[in-house]
Image: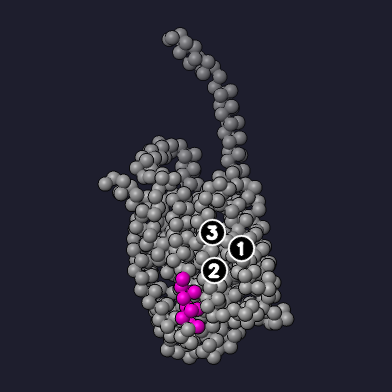
């Protein structure tokens, strides 16, 4: 045995150059491969950013373009106020029904192919619905577009968490800003575009199908690369550089610590999200802010028109409301990720909403621009809710479950709101009762937002519950 050891040592000493050369060749090859892989991942990450932005732009025009032309659509299809209320309730209903499917579809096909298919559905639905000629056909085509929006809504936080785990706030802000931009553009441009295109409301609605078709393009290369690993985050890259420098022991210790921490938490497949108080608080908060948002998108232009404001100006006021989300949707998520508790932001947004509703009640035309601005600030509860989805779970799979639960349950909660506003408007003959309802709903929105903003995760809650 000793002889064997000596012989092995002798062979090692006798060929130092060969070993060194071989190691150098492998190292060089490995460096080249790593460099190529890093470049590929960086290119894919940029493509994901483009896809996120274009997708976000298309997540609301199907709704706000209809809000701007709701009176013309009602007259063209012979809708009553109650049926129009049903039409404005279709978006959250579709988001609730189809949103439940998103996590399951993402597990089977991957989030990128599902979002790509969602963009195709949006383009098809928007192209078909203005020309169906009936309320039923209009609703069916709208549901097709809204199905695509629903799955994309759910999976956007999942894609952000997977590709940019150390930039959740900034990336959520980026696509929330793009979403607000698309929402505002649809509200502002639809009426003038309809006039330019011959005064036809059908043309004004159909033009948004082309914008949705463009959003399909950046996802197509990523669909082919669905098996590729996510892009390197800044943290991961730093970890890789440290390892390359020889700091393997600290990294291994860190990995061991993370492994033991993960072992103490429930696996995502066994995580019972419906038992989490934080998940329920976030779902109710999401549902109430969605109620306010869809009432605003569906009915606010009509409130201004009934107060004597022209159709074009009413569309611009709605656009101002939606445009407030462009800067704030980028600022609020970044601010939220720096706070341990997001309650103060929830309160500030809620107060803006209450003041805006009071203005709509007492002087809808006189202070129209001020109320539009305040309602726009209040509507930024949406990017805040999306940011909290990313912060209230530790893993990508956990975010997928929480996003699916909070958004699907939340949108289900929001379904009756726009419909009830339409019924109250038709039977009361004015906007007093609908505005009172909107104001009353703002109080539980603030309360549940404070509860959802506490510094905890659904995995930690499940761990504490199982330890009892």
| Mark 1 to mark 3 CA distance (whole Å) | 10 Å
- The disc at residue 397 is none
Residue lying furthest right = 198
Residue lying furthest left = 468
Q: Which quadrant holds the N terminus?
A: top left
| Lateral position of residue 443 relative to residue 94, left or right | left
**Residue in front for this viewpoint, 73 or 165:** 73
Q: Earlier in the sequence, mark 1 or mark 2?
A: 2
Secondary structure at numbered mark 1: helix
| Mark 3 to mark 2 CA distance (whole Å) | 12 Å
Magenta segment's dominant SS is helix
Q: Which residue is mark 1?
A: 144
* Residue 382 lies in the magenta stretch: no
| Mark 1 to mark 2 CA distance (whole Å) | 11 Å
Residue for point 73% across, 81% down = 198
* Residue 425 lies in the magenta stretch: yes
Residue for point 63% across, 82% down = 75
């Amino acid at each position: 045995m000793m002889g064997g050891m000596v012989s092995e040592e002798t062979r090692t000493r006798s060929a130092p150059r060969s070993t060194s050369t071989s190691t150098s060749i492998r190292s060089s090859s490995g460096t080249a491969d790593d460099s190529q892989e890093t470049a590929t991942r960086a290119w894919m990450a940029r493509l994901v950013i483009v896809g996120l932005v274009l997708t976000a732009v298309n997540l609301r025009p199907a709704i706000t373009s209809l809000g701007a032309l709701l009176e013309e659509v009602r007259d063209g299809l012979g809708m009553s106020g109650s049926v129009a209320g049903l039409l404005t309730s279709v978006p959250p209903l579709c988001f609730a029904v189809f949103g439940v499917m998103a996590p399951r579809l993402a597990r089977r096909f991957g989030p990128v192919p599902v979002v790509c298919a969602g963009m195709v559905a949006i383009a098809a639905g928007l192209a078909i619905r203005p020309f169906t000629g009936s309320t039923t056909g209009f609703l069916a085509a709208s549901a097709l577009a809204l199905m695509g929006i629903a799955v994309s809504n759910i999976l956007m936080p999942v894609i952000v968490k997977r590709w940019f785990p150390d930039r959740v706030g900034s990336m959520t802000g980026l696509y929330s800003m793009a979403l607000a931009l698309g929402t505002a553009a649809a509200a502002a441009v639809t009426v003038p575009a309809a006039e330019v295109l011959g005064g036809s409301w059908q043309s004004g609605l159909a033009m948004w199908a082309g914008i949705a078709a463009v959003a399909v393009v950046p996802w197509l290369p990523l669909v082919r690369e669905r098996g590729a690993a996510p892009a390197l985050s800044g943290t991961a890259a730093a970890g890789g550089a440290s390892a390359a420098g020889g700091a393997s022991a600290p990294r291994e210790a860190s990995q061991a610590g993370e492994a033991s921490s993960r072992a103490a938490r429930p696996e995502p497949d066994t995580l019972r999200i419906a038992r989490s108080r934080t998940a329920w608080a976030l779902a109710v908060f999401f549902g109430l802010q969605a109620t306010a948002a869809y009432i605003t998108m569906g009915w606010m232009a009509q409130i201004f028109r009934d107060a004597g404001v022209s159709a074009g100006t009413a569309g611009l006021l709605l656009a101002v409301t939606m445009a407030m989300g462009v800067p704030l949707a980028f600022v609020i998520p970044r601010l939220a990720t720096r706070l341990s508790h997001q309650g103060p932001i929830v309160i500030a947004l809620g107060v803006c909403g209450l003041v805006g509703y009071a203005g709509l009640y007492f002087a809808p035309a006189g202070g129209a621009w001020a109320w539009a601005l305040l309602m726009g600030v209040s509507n930024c509860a949406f990017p805040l809710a999306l940011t909290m989805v990313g912060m209230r779970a530790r893993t990508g799979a956990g975010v997928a479950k929480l996003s699916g639960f909070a958004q699907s349950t939340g949108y289900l909660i929001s379904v009756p709101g726009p419909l009830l506003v339409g019924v109250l408007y038709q039977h009361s003959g004015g906007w007093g009762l609908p505005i009172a309802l909107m104001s009353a709903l703002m109080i539980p929105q603030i309360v549940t937002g404070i509860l959802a903003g506490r510094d905890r995760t659904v995995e930690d809650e499940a761990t504490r519950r199982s330890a009892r």
